[in-house]
Image (cartoon, grey):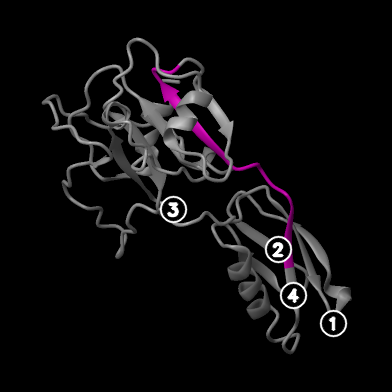
Amino acid sequence: MMISAWLLVSTMALAQNAMPQSSATSANIDNPPQKTSTIPGFQTRGWRYTVQPSDQLDVSFTLTPEFNQTVTVQPDGFITLRGAGDVMAMGKTLPQLTDAIREAYAATLKDPIIFVNPIKFENPSITVGGQVGKPGRFDWQDQTTLTQAIAMAGGFTDTAKHSQVLLFRRVSNEWAEARIINVKGMMNKKDLHEDPVLQPGDMLYVPKNTISKIKPFIPLPSVGMYANRF
């Protein structure tokens, strides 16, 4: 579930003129998306598990075990709680969902002690496509970097554009941030300090031809045009 929701088929225009190269270069800003009031910056902090559709969660009540239950996140992102109705779970961290469940039971239970634990969920993963030896989806591991992910995918092919590797990262339910990474520049300088650490759900695309411009924020469905090229 981690990435399947945003790898949908669509189209996105690419400009033709050459782009100045620099290692870890952010894309040129066109017009920021207007649908969201706040657009997060490129996220570099540590990853935390967030609930996704089809995840199974164990909800336990320490003082009132009769309310203990196992719930499955529905395709629309909701869970149905016994005696409390539907609660939106998708996209929430476990502490956030625990608070939401506590609020849902506020009229029934006084200061309940609640623990929420995932018991079935899709393993965190990253996706690498384009001009690599073995494009596909790979299990994410803590501190996996972009160059390590490319190595996991069989390395660059002879036709790869090393200087313009695209990194897509989901920043909201509607938007993904796109960044162009100059891997060739990093390798030539023998300095991997700018090698970005990946997060679950990140998608890498290694192009064959030069990509001169890409908007820094694009709708999630637009990312699918790259997924179709794997």
Q: Is residue 201 left or right of residue 23?
A: right
Residue at x 87% of width, y 75% of height = 65
The residue that mark 4 highlights is: 114
Disc 1 to disc 2, C-alpha distance: 21 Å
Which numbered disc, 3 or 2, marks the residue closer to the eye?
A: 3
Q: Are marks 4 and 2 in contact (CB under 8 Å)?
A: no
Q: Residues within 10 Å of mark 1 (few under 14, many from 20)?
A: few
Which numbered disc, 3 or 4, marks the residue closer to the eye?
A: 4
Image coordinates of residue 104 in percent, x first then y, are: 66, 77
- Find the residue positioned furthest to the top: 158
Image coordinates of residue 160 in percent, x first then y, are: 33, 17
Residue at x 26% of width, y 26% of height = 163
Q: Magenta span: helix, strand or loop, mainly?
A: strand
The residue that mark 2 highlights is: 80
Q: Residues within 10 Å of mark 2 (few under 14, many from 20)?
A: some
- Find the residue positioned furthest to the front: 190
Disc 3 to disc 4, C-alpha distance: 27 Å
Residue at x 28% of width, y 36% of height = 180
User: Is 28 included in the stretch rendered in magenta?
Assistant: no
Disc 3 to disc 1, C-alpha distance: 35 Å
> Of the residues shown, which amino acid type is indicated by label 1?
Leu
> Of the residues shown, which amino acid type is indicated by label 4?
Ile
Q: Are marks 3 and 4 in contact (CB under 8 Å)?
A: no
Disc 4 to disc 2, C-alpha distance: 16 Å
